[in-house]
Image (cartoon, rainbow, N blue to C red):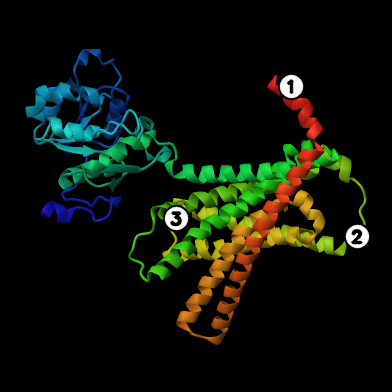
């Protein structure tokens, strides 16, 4: 019962100090194995003033000068006997059964397992759990497996400082945590020994939290790029013979990237609003969110950074557009002064620059070194308040860019709207949900006539938008069937000429 009460309540909590703490030179640590990790760990421990004994099955095979002079070389059993408590197993897991001959010497020792899994999804128990089954009279602690040999040699300046620990023994974790602090690392309690299955696969995982956001961003870019290719290049070429395929390398990506950034920024703030609405609908905040919503909430940082990347690339691409040969050849002519055009360009450029500046601030505050010095209110103000400001400026940037052209019949060539019209729908919905939540909160708190009026207006807008969307979808289906049927009839001779050739 005492072990349960003294265990950390939350996984990932820092391991508390357990006096008396380890002092320099007062304890001897044994390392079984003579490989690269063993040598790096021995060098680090000696530099921190800890006595080290390296145990090997064949001491004579260790090359002279491989270990520092302060490290004592011995047999495996001799090293275990000289160690007071801690024994680091720098061995391959398949060699653990070879230590059964010195089981009596290992009894009562704290065995530190530094091995990792060989593959993901093996479905068997972890190396640390198998080690605990082989040596039930010893205390097994999983640790130092996410620290590379390079980090041990160069110190904590060029690598991660966190040492993840897990064990069924609180005392064993505390002793290993003291050793980690002495070496300049930051020990983190990851739970009991069952968590070693997660720790051993961590070095094998490549950005696990980034896979979904990266896939979503790539699919969004692919959609807008393909949409722009179909609307602005392929269909005009087939219908009118206009050759604009030179825009594939620079102009078309520059049109797709801001759309991706706008939708990604909307996807950052949409799950928070959905979570708030779900809590209001349930009438409690103590029920867990659905799994898909919980995963979406945990990936908001990655989506925001990818949106910032797309916005930054859009800015760089836009700076490169005037340098193109095509731009210099076509647009190097004098244009008459257009007052509305001047205001339009200045406004949408100003909104875009301001939005990119705020997104840069959000990206900087997402760094752990910056976010840790902010209070919760400051962090919430930056990520939520300034985030919605950046979203509003981005939407304004898009709307001013579209200006009245979005309502012109010429903008809907082949009955396909411009790509920015599609991209701005999700951010506008997020801002509408945000204002709706604000109105609902003021209605519940203040019960003012103004709040009721705004709430009623939003309900009417919702009904209008839903009706408009349904009508728009039906019209689109009809138009697409009509257009592509007409195109097939018009270009039937092309199909009749080329299709049999490929069939043969």
Q: Is residue 436 above or below residue 484?
A: below
User: Alpha-carbon neighbours of circle 1 within 10 Å: few (<14), some, or many (≥20)?
Assistant: few
Which residue is most to the left? 104
Sequence-wise, which precedes: disc 1 or disc 3? 3
Q: Are marks 3 and 2 in contact (CB under 8 Å)?
A: no
Which label lies toward us, 1 or 3? 1
Q: Nearer the viewer, residue 31 or 477?
A: 477
The residue tagged 2 is 337
Tell me if residue 116 can be seen.
yes
Sequence-wise, which precedes: disc 3 or disc 2? 3
Q: Is residue 468 left or right of residue 303?
A: right
Q: Is residue 234 left or right of residue 54?
A: right
Q: Is residue 458 left or right of residue 41?
A: right
Residue 297 marker: 3
Which label lies toward us, 3 or 2? 3
At numbered mark 2, what does the secondary structure look like: helix, strand or loop?
loop
Residue at x 27%, y 29% (from the top left corner): 42
Sequence-wise, which precedes: disc 1 or disc 2? 2
User: Alpha-carbon neighbours of circle 2 within 10 Å: few (<14), some, or many (≥20)?
Assistant: few
What is the tally of numbered marks visible in this picture? 3
The residue tagged 1 is 501
Estimate the spatial distance between the alpha carbons at disc 1 and disc 3, rounded to whole Å. Answer: 52 Å
At numbered mark 1, what does the secondary structure look like: helix, strand or loop?
helix
Q: Is residue 81 above or below residue 289?
A: above
Residue at x 81%, y 32% (from the top left corner): 493
Q: Is residue 377 above or below residue 247?
A: below
């Amino acid at each position: 019962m005492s072990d349960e009460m003294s265990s950390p309540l939350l996984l990932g909590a820092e391991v508390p100090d357990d006096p008396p703490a380890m002092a320099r030179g007062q304890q001897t640590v044994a390392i079984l194995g003579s490989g690269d990790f063993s040598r790096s760990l021995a060098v680090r421990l000696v530099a921190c003033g800890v006595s080290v004994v390296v145990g090997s099955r064949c001491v004579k095979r260790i090359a002279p000068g491989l270990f520092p002079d302060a490290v004592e070389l011995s047999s495996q059993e001799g090293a275990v006997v000289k160690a007071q408590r801690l024994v680091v197993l720098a061995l391959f897991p398949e060699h653990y059964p070879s230590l059964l001959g010195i089981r009596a010497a290992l009894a009562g020792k704290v065995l530190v397992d530094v091995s990792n899994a060989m593959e993901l999804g093996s479905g068997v128990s972890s190396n640390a759990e198998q080690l605990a089954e082989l040596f039930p009279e010893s205390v097994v602690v999983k640790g130092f497996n996410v620290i590379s040999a390079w980090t041990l040699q160069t110190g904590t300046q060029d690598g991660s400082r966190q040492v993840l620990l897990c064990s069924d023994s609180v005392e064993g974790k505390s002793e290993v945590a003291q050793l980690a602090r002495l070496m300049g690392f930051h020990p983190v309690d990851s739970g009991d020994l069952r968590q070693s299955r997660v720790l051993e696969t961590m070095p094998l995982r490549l950005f696990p939290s980034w896979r979904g956001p990266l896939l979503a961003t790539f699919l969004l870019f692919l959609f807008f790029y393909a949409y722009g290719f179909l609307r602005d290049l392929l269909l005009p070429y087939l219908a009118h013979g206009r050759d604009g395929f030179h825009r594939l390398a620079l102009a078309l990506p520059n049109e797709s990237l801001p759309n991706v950034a706008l939708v990604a920024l909307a996807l950052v703030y949409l799950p928070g609003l959905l979570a708030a609405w779900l809590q209001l609908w349930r009438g409690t905040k103590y029920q867990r969110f659905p799994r898909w919503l919980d995963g979406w909430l945990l990936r908001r940082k990655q989506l925001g950074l990818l949106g910032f990347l797309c916005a930054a690339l859009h800015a760089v691409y836009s700076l490169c557009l005037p340098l193109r040969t095509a731009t210099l050849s076509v647009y190097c002519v004098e244009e008459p002064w257009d007052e509305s055009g001047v205001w339009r360009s200045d406004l949408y450029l100003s909104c875009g620059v301001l939005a990119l500046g705020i997104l840069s601030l959000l990206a900087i505050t997402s760094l752990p070194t910056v976010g840790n010095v902010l209070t919760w209110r400051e962090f919430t103000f930056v990520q939520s308040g300034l985030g919605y400001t950046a979203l509003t400026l981005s939407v304004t940037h898009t709307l001013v860019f579209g200006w009245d052209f979005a309502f012109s019949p010429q903008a809907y060539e082949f009955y396909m709207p411009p790509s920015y019209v599609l991209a701005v729908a999700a951010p506008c919905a997020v801002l509408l949900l945000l204002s709706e939540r604000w109105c609902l909160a003021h209605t519940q708190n203040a019960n003012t006539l103004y709040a009721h009026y705004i709430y009623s207006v939003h309900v009417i807008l919702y009904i209008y938008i839903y009706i408009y969307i349904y009508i728009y979808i039906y019209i689109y289906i009809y138009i697409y069937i009509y257009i592509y049927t007409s195109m097939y009839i018009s270009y039937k001779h092309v199909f009749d000429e080329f299709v049999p050739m490929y069939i043969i």
